[in-house]
Amino acid sequence: MAELPEPISHTVLAIYSAYETRAGSFGDSRGVPMSQVANECERSIWYSLRWCSNPEKITGQKQSIFDTGIAWEERLLDDLELIGCQVDRLDPATGAQFRVELADGWLRGKLDGQVLGLPEAPKTLHVVETKSHNNKSFKELTKKKLKEGKPAHYTQCQLYCHARGLTRCFYYAVNKDTDERYTERVEYDHAFCLRLEAKVARIVKSDRAPSRLFEDPTSKAAFACGWCPAKPQCHEGAWARRNCRTCISASLEDGAVVRCALKDIELDYKAQQAGCGSHLYLPDLVAGEQVDASESERWVKYKMADGSEWVDGDVK
């Protein structure tokens, strides 16, 4: 006889449900988050920018993890104030969290704050970036240091300096399992940031999906494909969502503006998500070969992988 499963705690389920209700889901990003631009797969960034996959649904347990990270962020900033540093958590210009934009508004991020009075360099104003790690992640950080061990975090530090016009970032991390702390002063690398801005500009301006990093997502080298949200569209022939950013008529312009070339209007965030009845997929989002099209009647015919034909649009 099989063992009976452990009873479900209805209290825990209720708590997770409350967290989940409060969290909702992550919305589509208006641009490329600075936390993601270090991704070496430009195709993945392009899919994300074009809103091809459904936004992540946040479980109650995952939201609890996020809340713990936020609590640690505040505690680490408290640490700096405890030793006499001046910490700016809010942008004096807005009274809200520091927000920065680069690459004509398409590369976007939020700072934890700025700090002045660090014992290592008391007169130098630093961007401050705080992170909490589990034991395994923390050991990797302390062994390899920031640039090699956590390239996404290093990239954030660099871009925040670039956007704020500062020359140093103070990276302050904690091991959540042991409370051990780690710090690193990051020197601003101007050329590194310019390359990233150029990368984003290239992705934004392209109507074509960049090449795949790996043709076989099951290969050992392609382990990152396993958790990429766009894997179904990239490797499995799944349909992308219908919205303005997956439409052939969408024009991504400077200032993080999305314009409909068909109607010659600028589209706000809600309109972009809603799309319209004139939607035609960008050809790279269709798992088939384009064989015919009519611009005046607005339809495109494809030969699909199984040999069938599919027409995108209304054929009169």
Image (cartoon, rainbow, N blue to C red):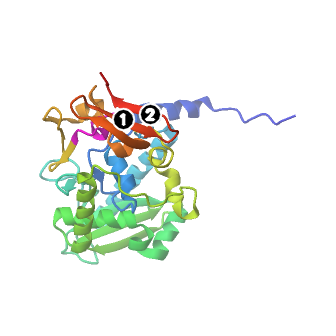
Question: How many marks overall?
Answer: 2
N-term-proximal mark, 2 vs 1: 1
Q: Which quadrant, please, contains the C terminus?
A: top left
Residue furthest bottom as drawn: 120
Q: Amino acid at mark 1?
A: Lys
Q: Is residue 283 above or below residue 280?
A: below
Can you identify the residue that label 2 sits on? 309
Q: Amino acid at mark 2?
A: Glu
- Residue 115: tell me if it is visible: no
Q: Residue at x 19, y 35 (%)?
A: 268
Q: Nearer the viewer, residue 82 or 264?
A: 264
Q: Residue at x 46, y 35 (%)?
A: 19
> What predominant SS class does the magenta segment belong to?
loop
Q: Range of the magenta residues? A: 241-250
Q: Which mark is residue 301?
A: 1
Q: Position of residue 65 (x, y in %)?
A: 47, 47
Marks 2 and 1 in Cβ contact (< 8 Å)? yes
What secondary structure is found at the residue carrying circle 1? Answer: strand
Q: Is residue 69 above or below residue 185?
A: above
Q: Position of residue 23 (x, y in %)?
A: 40, 36
Q: Position of residue 253 (x, y in %)?
A: 17, 48
